[in-house]
Image: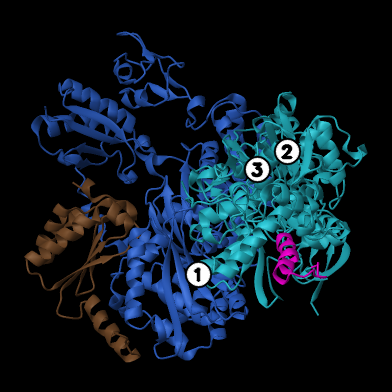
Chain colours: A cyan, B brown, C blue
């Protein structure tokens, strides 16, 4: 049994397991202590000094986020000294922050702004020089140093969770700032533009490069035929942007909003996810049977592709040659769909709605083009999509549900779970086992590959073939698995890798949830539930059962891994330097 | 080589005899070579002293570097210890002055008064102001 | 070029009282009469330190020294020395030659009033020769500890000695060792903080340069006491001589088997290595130092956990500074009783100070705890140069405060210094006289802190910057009364809220100068004047029309042509053009230019 410690917060007795912090203990009493730099399990450094509390007998105030609860201590969370110090400290932070809240991308979703309100700060009396000024625009991510409060959350996520080391603390004292290392831009260092820094930034110092105007200009142009395609994970989080609780399914409204915005078609990337299973599954079986490079590793996550190209250039042959579902659907819209509907592909613009910032880097890859046209014309993150919906005056809460347009519609339950870690693996298993055995299997659910554990491994035997597989998500877990691949000791046939921890549901383009909420709710699990529910409620659970998939092979692609498939749906990779 | 307690004790005794001049040597000359001394120019003084002692074959003279004595403003400081236990502290030394100290004091046996630390009524006086 | 002589006449208070000003006039007159104006110059200088024999006159470059020169002597002195070319024997300083005590450093008051434990071997042995260290009793304490004492005995002796951390905090060294001794862990470390960074402080450097083995031996003793087998000395890379001597000491000790495995056949193992610091002041803070040893950014960690439980690489660690370690062998060899006899009730032993600023004998001294500041400044260190008046002494560097005249007789110890608004710190002691502007002093220390803040917490990162901006504004003449409240508000926030001791104490110089010299702040803010004439924007150089002889020297010397005037008309400084460089003042032969 764990040891309990008893002490008092604001005179109220509290008993918590040893090792609990004062911040967590206060929460059990429903006392919220403000935090800024705190990111549970990731950035617990006691730096921002906003969570200070008074501990009787201690000269200076103590940061509750790292102060361990101890027997008999007396804690005050709201004494005059605490209030005054927190407020003055907040004033100091604000005096070095570009305060343009009304036009800031994080307005109304800013932890600093919210804190100012909660602490009742009426005026910032402290003035002086500001330390940061530089704004750096990358393909997917913008860094605005004038907003950076040097909480180091981005640095911790980039180093500890993602194992990239792209961001680091630069300079000292007043000039200290979170920056790409060596004073370079993100694109010149080991950044994969996964956007984990963005969704963990408490303020507007890191955000997606906004492409909403570009998307809207396509819709505005009467000459163009605009197609929106939505990724599986978007539906699991979009509703949060409109005030719904975490874990609300927004599929129907997401489609309706797209149509109201004026897209000529709203397709589902899920269709391409089913197609991916057909292509990738066939590729895997081929590799196993023909002695191809193993383990084969999934290629849906563009953050992961960037990661692999920069960090494991020698293992590019292990990557599946399949384009990501986004790439596949873009290529098909501009070939198959255009051909079947007699539309000039040059007039088609595909707008991809993604939970991901790295997708913005994927669409500019020269490999993802056909006849001089990029497969996808613009990527909007979930947040940007919400922004244009709001901008268009669409009353999201009150709009009805709609279904996706024909041709590339929702697809199977196997497709929708692509948005959560383990989903691709599970979908692949459902199809692969039936392909290998040639029999219809009753087994649909593979709970051992679900969930947020960092590395999940398992094996399955079918038709005399034992398949060893592994699922990894988040850069640090990926590194462990990939070091084995690199060393030649990896025992697996097949590995699913997603760059973001939790998979796409927690992608860098998803709605931003504040750190205190994330400390009590695992948003990865909550959002994943939406997808697994949709899967469970879908009469079609296996990709190869998708009638649209059957149709496209019949009328266009002939068969998985055919010549045509290779031309349109497969790609290749190239080694890239970590540092430019 | 690792030393036993016994060997360490032997080194202690032998070296103590050396530094207290209970051997056949006559003078131990210490030059303050800490950072403060070096900054004031003690290195050339030390080098010159070493050279003179070698050139003149003064086998009875130890020349030793040492740390900071504490009175940084009159560095470079050179202290001369003699067999009878007497000590002379020379301050603000230069390579030229040290030559004179060797000639007159070490060889000649007469302290070079004008270079020594000078105290009048408890106050430290730069020796050069004495006529 | 003609043979140019300079007659230096002491202008210190003592000589001034003996009419040195009149003497200067008389000398100038005599020079003119002898038509020596081209070759002989009269200059007023600072105190020679022989006030009793004033007025003092020295003729350079020949350095002829005359004492007790009366106004009436002027003409004869000029004629004898310069015209005849002989010594003016009547006043030649030699009659008291017999009174002069000189020869050895150890005869000086400066030395005699000290009590040397940590500095005992500095200046006496060759620091690069382990044999010389052995000769003065080196490594006997280690042998005694290893062969005759249990670890708990060692901790007990150190605790009873009353030794407290010499790095500034003043925490009981024995207690610290005890915590680490009791801490659970297969692996433990001892570490030495040699990241000395206070402006003007060099106690630790001096010990490592002059007596490195005393630290090596003490660390081995500490390791035995707490059960550690590995140690680090964290020393700043700007101390190359200290690093060299220490490395030699470690290598030699290893060679003799005094470090390494099975030391002196007792089965005790201890290895020691050096970690070089890049010179960040904050790395003197213990948790930042641990980070730096581990190769991380030099930033403090929140405490708890304390290093005694989770230090280097998460293992129990003790961290003491150089001077603390330098006391250990004496405590072991001479017994804790003898050590505890020295000092005050709660502060035992001695303390090393590096004294600088407006003081005659700058340098390094070690005094028994309980000595007063007056004894240090006036008895041991010879007082303030040039007959200027003592204004304040800063202890504790940028984390400390200033001590004023009224507290000069307080016995120095950890608690007394805190009680009078300063702190012991690591031993930097800066003396200031009436020519120091206390607002400028606060600005200087804040500027230092802003440079040295690691930036981890916003309280220090931004708070110190904002305080500096306000202080600069005040020094610039743009201060307003509300700035004092702003300073106090931010200072309070730092003290309550900053992450580490550096930040928590960063506002001390401001609070301390505000408490003791508020009138100077008000003079800057309200009267727009800097009483000490330091802050340029608040100081005007003014020519006294009565004294000005219109010689034109100031006009010629002024680098920005701010001075106008013609022959026979008193000159005037255009305050708009003036850059307050002071060149005019030092070039005026008639003392007609003053700062206002």
* Residue A487 numbered mark, or none: 1
The residue carrying mark 3 is: A331
Badge 1 or badge 3: first in the primary sequence: 3
Q: Secondary structure at mark 2?
A: helix
Foreground residue among C482 and A557: A557
Q: With A319 as the anchor, is A124 left or right in this view?
A: right
The main secondary structure of the magenta stretch is: helix
**Cβ atoms under marks 2 and 1 closer than 8 Å:** no
Q: Are marks 1 and 3 on the same chain?
A: yes
Element on which disc 1 rests: helix
Q: Which residues are magenta?
A: A423-445
In this view, the mark in front (3 or 2): 2
Q: Which mark is residue A340?
A: 2
**Left or right, residue A278 beside residue C259:** right
Q: Earlier in the sequence, mark 2 or mark 1?
A: 2
The residue that appears at 52% across and 30% down in the rendered structure is: C531
**Disc 2 packing (10 Å; few <14; some 14–19; many ≥20):** few
Answer left or right for B52 relative to A437: left
**Quadrant in which the N terminus of chain A appears:** bottom right
The image position of residue A250, as x and y in percent, is 85, 46
- The label nearer to you, 1 versus 3, is 3
Name the residue located 79 percent from the left edge and 77 percent from the top edge.
A2
Q: Quadrant of residue A307?
A: bottom right
> In the figure, A145 relative to C288: above or below?
above
């Amino acid at each position: 049994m764990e040891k309990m410690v008893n002490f008092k917060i604001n005179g109220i007795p509290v008993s918590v397991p040893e090792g609990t912090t004062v911040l967590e203990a206060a929460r059990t009493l429903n006392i919220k202590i403000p935090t800024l730099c705190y990111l549970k399990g990731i950035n617990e450094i006691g730096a921002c000094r906003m969570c200070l509390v008074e501990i009787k007998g201690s000269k200076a105030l103590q940061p509750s986020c790292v102060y361990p609860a101890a027997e008999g201590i007396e804690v005050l969370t709201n004494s005059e000294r605490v209030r005054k110090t927190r407020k003055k400290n907040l004033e100091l932070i604000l005096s070095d922050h570009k305060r343009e809240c009304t036009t800031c991308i994080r307005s109304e979703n800013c932890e600093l702004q919210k804190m100012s309100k909660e602490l009742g700060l009426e005026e910032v009396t402290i003035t002086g020089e500001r330390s940061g000024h530089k704004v750096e625009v990358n393909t997917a991510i913008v860094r605005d140093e004038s907003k950076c409060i040097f909480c180091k959350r981005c640095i911790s996520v980039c180093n500890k969770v993602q194992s990239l080391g792209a961001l680091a603390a630069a300079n000292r004292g007043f000039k200290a700032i979170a920056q790409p290392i060596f004073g370079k831009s993100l694109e010149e260092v080991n950044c994969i533009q996964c956007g984990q820094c963005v969704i963990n930034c408490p303020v507007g110092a890191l955000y997606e490069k906004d492409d909403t105007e570009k998307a809207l200009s396509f819709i505005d142009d009467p000459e163009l035929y605009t197609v929106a395609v939505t990724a599986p994970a978007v539906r699991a989080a979009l509703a949060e942007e409109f005030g719904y609780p975490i874990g609300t399914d927004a599929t129907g409204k997401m489609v309706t909003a797209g149509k109201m915005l004026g897209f000529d078609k709203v397709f589902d990337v899920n269709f391409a996810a089913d197609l991916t299973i057909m292509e990738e599954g066939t590729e895997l079986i081929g590799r196993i049977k023909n002695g191809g490079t193993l383990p084969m590793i999934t290629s849906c996550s563009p953050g992961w592709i960037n990661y692999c190209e920069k960090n494991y250039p020698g293992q590019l042959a292990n990557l599946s040659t399949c384009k990501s579902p986004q790439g596949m659907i873009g290529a098909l819209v501009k070939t198959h769909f255009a051909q079947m509907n007699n539309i000039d592909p040059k007039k088609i613009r595909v707008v991809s709605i993604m939970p991901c910032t790295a997708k913005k880097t994927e669409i500019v890859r020269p490999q993802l083009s056909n006849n001089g046209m990029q497969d996808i014309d613009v990527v909007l993150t979930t947040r940007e999509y919400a922004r244009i919906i709001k901008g268009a005056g669409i009353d999201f809460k009150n709009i009805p549900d709609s279904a996706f347009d024909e041709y590339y519609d929702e697809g199977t339950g196997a497709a929708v779970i692509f948005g959560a870690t383990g989903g691709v693996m599970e979908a692949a298993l459902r199809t692969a086992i039936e392909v290998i055995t040639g029999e219809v299997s009753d087994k649909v659910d593979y709970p051992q590959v679900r969930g947020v554990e960092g590395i999940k491994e398992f094996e399955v035997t079918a038709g005399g073939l034992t398949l060893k597989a592994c699922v990894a998500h988040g850069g640090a877990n990926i590194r462990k698995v990939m070091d084995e691949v690199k060393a030649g000791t990896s025992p697996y046939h097949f590995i699913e890798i997603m760059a973001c921890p939790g998979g796409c549901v927690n992608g860098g383009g998803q709605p931003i949830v504040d750190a205190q909420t994330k400390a009590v709710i695992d948003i990865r699990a909550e959002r994943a539930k939406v997808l697994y529910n949709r899967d469970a409620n879908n009469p079609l659970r296996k990709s190869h059962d998708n009638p649209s998939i059957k149709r496209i092979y019949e009328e266009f692609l002939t068969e998985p891994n055919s010549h045509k498939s290779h031309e349109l749906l497969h790609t290749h990779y190239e080694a890239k330097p970590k540092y430019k | 080589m690792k030393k036993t307690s016994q060997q360490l004790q032997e080194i202690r005794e032998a070296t103590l005899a050396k530094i207290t001049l209970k051997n056949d040597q006559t003078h131990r000359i210490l030059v303050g070579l800490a950072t403060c001394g070096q900054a004031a120019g003690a290195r050339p003084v030390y080098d010159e002293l070493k050279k003179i002692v070698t050139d003149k074959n003064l086998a009875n003279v130890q020349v030793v570097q040492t740390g900071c004595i504490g009175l940084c403003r009159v560095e470079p400081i050179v202290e001369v210890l003699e067999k009878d236990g007497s000590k002379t502290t020379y301050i603000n030394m230069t390579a030229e002055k040290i030559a004179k100290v060797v000639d007159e004091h070490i060889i000649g046996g007469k302290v070079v008064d004008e270079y020594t630390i000078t105290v009048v009524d408890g106050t430290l006086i730069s020796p050069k102001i004495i006529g | 070029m003609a043979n140019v002589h300079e007659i230096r006449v002491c202008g210190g208070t003592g000589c001034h009282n003996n009419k040195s000003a009149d003497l200067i006039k008389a000398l100038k007159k005599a020079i003119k009469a002898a038509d020596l104006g081209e070759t002989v110059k009269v200059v007023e200088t600072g105190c020679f330190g022989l006030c009793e024999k004033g007025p003092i006159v020295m003729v350079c470059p020949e350095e002829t020294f005359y004492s007790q020169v009366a106004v009436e002597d002027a003409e004869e002195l000029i004629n004898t020395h310069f015209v005849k070319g002989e010594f003016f024997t009547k006043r030649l300083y030699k009659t008291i030659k017999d009174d002069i005590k000189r020869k050895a450093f150890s005869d000086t008051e400066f030395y005699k009033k000290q009590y040397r434990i940590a500095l005992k071997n500095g200046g006496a042995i060759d620091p690069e020769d382990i044999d010389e260290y052995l000769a003065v009793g080196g490594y006997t304490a280690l042998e005694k500890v290893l062969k005759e004492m249990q670890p708990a005995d060692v901790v007990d002796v150190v605790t009873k000695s009353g030794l407290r951390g010499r790095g500034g905090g003043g925490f009981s060294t024995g207690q610290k060792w005890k915590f680490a001794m009791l801490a659970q862990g297969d692996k433990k470390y001892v570490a030495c903080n040699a990241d000395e960074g206070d402006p003007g402080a060099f106690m630790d450097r001096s010990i490592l340069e002059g007596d490195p083995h005393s630290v090596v031996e003490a660390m081995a003793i500490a390791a035995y006491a707490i059960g550690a087998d590995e140690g680090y000395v964290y020393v700043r890379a700007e101390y190359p001589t200290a690093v060299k001597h220490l490395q030699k000491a470690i290598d030699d000790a290893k060679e003799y088997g005094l470090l390494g495995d099975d030391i002196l056949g007792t089965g005790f193992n201890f290895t020691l290595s050096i970690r070089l610091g890049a010179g960040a002041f904050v790395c003197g803070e213990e948790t930042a130092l641990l980070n730096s040893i581990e190769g991380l950014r030099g930033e403090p960690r929140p405490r708890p956990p304390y290093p005694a439980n989770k230090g280097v690489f998460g293992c129990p660690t003790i961290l003491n500074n150089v001077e603390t370690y330098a006391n250990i062998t004496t405590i072991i060899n001479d017994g804790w009783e003898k050590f505890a006899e020295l000092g005050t009730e709660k502060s035992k032993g001695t303390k090393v100070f590096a004294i600088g600023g407006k003081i005659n004998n700058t340098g390094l001294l070690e005094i028994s705890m309980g000595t007063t500041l007056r004894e240090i400044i006036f008895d041991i260190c010879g007082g303030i140069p040039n007959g200027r008046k003592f204004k304040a002494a800063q202890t504790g560097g940028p984390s400390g405060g200033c001590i004023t005249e009224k507290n000069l007789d307080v016995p120095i110890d950890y608690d007394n210094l805190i009680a009078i608004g300063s702190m012991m710190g690591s031993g930097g002691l800066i003396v200031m006289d009436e020519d120091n502007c206390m607002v400028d002093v606060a600005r200087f220390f804040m500027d230092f802190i802003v440079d040295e803040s690691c930036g981890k917490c916003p309280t220090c990162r931004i708070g110190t910057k904002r305080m500096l901006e306000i202080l600069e504004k005040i020094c610039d003449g743009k201060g307003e009364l509300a700035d004092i409240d702003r300073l106090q508000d931010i200072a309070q926030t730092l003290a309550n809220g900053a992450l580490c001791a550096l930040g928590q104490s960063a506002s001390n110089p401001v609070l301390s100068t505000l408490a003791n010299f508020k009138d100077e702040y008000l003079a800057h803010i309200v009267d727009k004047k800097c009483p000490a004439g330091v802050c340029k924007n608040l100081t005007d150089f003014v020519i006294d029309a009565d004294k000005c002889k219109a010689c034109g020297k100031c006009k010629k010397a002024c680098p920005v042509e701010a001075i106008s005037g013609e022959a026979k008309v008193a000159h005037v400084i255009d305050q708009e053009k003036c850059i307050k460089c002071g060149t005019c003042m030092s070039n005026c032969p008639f003392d007609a230019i003053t700062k206002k």
